[in-house]
Image (cartoon, helix red, strand yellow):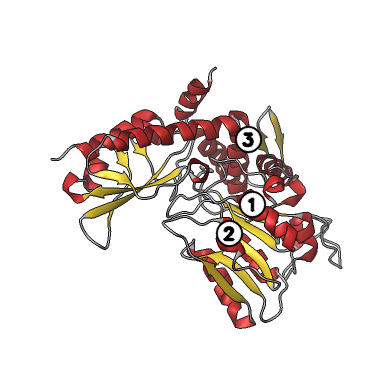
Amino acid sequence: MNVTDKFAEFRTHVPVLSHTAYFETSSTGLIPDFVHDGVARYQEDRYLKGGDSLWELPGGESGGTIAMMDWAKAQIAQMIGTEKENIIFGNNSSHIYTLFTSGMYFEPGDNVVLVENSWIANRFAWQIRQRDGIEIRYAKAKEGIVLPEDLFALCDGRTRAVCVSLVESFTGFRLDAAAIGAFCREKGIWFVADCVQTLGVLPVDVQKMGIDFLIGNDYKWMMNYCGTGYGYISPALQRELKQFGAGWMSDDERFNTRKQVLHLREDAGRFELGFPTVSGIYGLGLVAAKYLEMGAADIAAYVSHLSGYLGQKVSKTEGVHFTYDFAKAHQSAIHVLHIDETTGVTNEKLKAAGVGASVNPICNGGMLEMRVALHYYNNTEDINRLIDVINTKK
């Protein structure tokens, strides 16, 4: 099967695409049949049989919940270039992020460097620590662009962490992670990467990028149900991060209920407290396994091809243009369009045409904004359908 055919085949496993050209993955992704069926099978077993379920894993194997979690960690670890011992699951990406913001040691007057107007949860997680004396420094984007030098200029001898989104949610700008990671390693600064808008569609390698702490979520590009976050904690950071809570999952002898004294695990699992949302973890494992099967390089190339096709169509369409002009190295799977109101595009027209996208008025009037997310389940016909709505003035 050639590259184009395998993406066309994958598309048949996403039922929504049979009636909708879907572009809202940056908000909420679609669910493929293998995730739905796998999670439904677990729910039915719990409902009809009771007790723990045996999870069906790719290759015909099966195992209990702890074995399944171990397998899912291994899939995610392989996605990002690390070992499963460095992966952790939690309630959501915000929960995972606060393991770092709450557990990092600092003294009053120390600082962290963020990007202004980036994702709100990551800003809030630090702002609540200002009462403890941490200073927050914000790098300002210029026409949506944040260069490594913009972050470096804010760092000094008291900078404890640089925290960024590898892909900015509202602009689609992709930061130069490797350059930031190299700088942070040299200066002894922790590098924290929010990869919610990256993982599942663009390649990430925590070793090559020098990432110390990574967060991801389940319900966007990872095509899963809501309620499960995951993260990576480097071995060096695991040794430094302060832990404020512990549960039976944190112990090195899980299920030893007669044990009287806690002995923390030697891996990132020490930060897992109790029984998690196991169906969400299973879904994440299935999607990560599919990502590995499809191939990170092929996925990135295919999505880049779709982005190029969107660019060609936009350039030939009156009344629409890209909001930002990013060099290819800084482009992601998210694109922001400005559409003239005279085109007559409305959310009602998009819905009636079977296009999963939305427009919002821009403050200065006369223009609408649309965020277009291109997953590897999309194709050029989806893009044609979107452009047709923009071209139809009725």
Q: Residue at x 41, y 34 (%)?
A: 308
Instruction: Tell me the quarter of the image containing the C terminus.
Output: top left
| Mark 2 or 3, nearer chain start | 2
Helix or strand or loop: what does disc 3 sit on? helix
Query: In front: 80, or 44?
Result: 80
Q: Callout 1, which amino acid?
A: Ala
Helix or strand or loop: what does disc 1 sit on? helix
Residue identified by numbered label 3: 289
In the rendered image, residue 242, in percent from the top left (x then y), is placed at 75, 69
Residue 393 in which image quadrant: top left
Helix or strand or loop: what does disc 2 sit on? helix
Query: In front: 243, or 63?
Result: 243
Instruction: Give me the disc on residue 149.
Output: 2
Question: Among all residues in the image, which is located at the extreme top?
Answer: 1
Nearest-to-viewer mark from 3 and 1? 1
Query: In front: 257, or 71?
Result: 71
Residue 284 in which image quadrant: top right
Question: Among all residues in the image, which is located at the extreme left?
Answer: 394
In the rendered image, residue 190, in percent from the top left (x then y), is placed at 70, 62
Left or right of 131 in this view: 107: right
In the rendered image, residue 268, in percent from the top left (x then y), is placed at 75, 56
Instruction: Give me the disc on residue 179.
Output: 1
| Mark 3 or 1, nearer chain start | 1
Q: Callout 3, which amino acid?
A: Ala
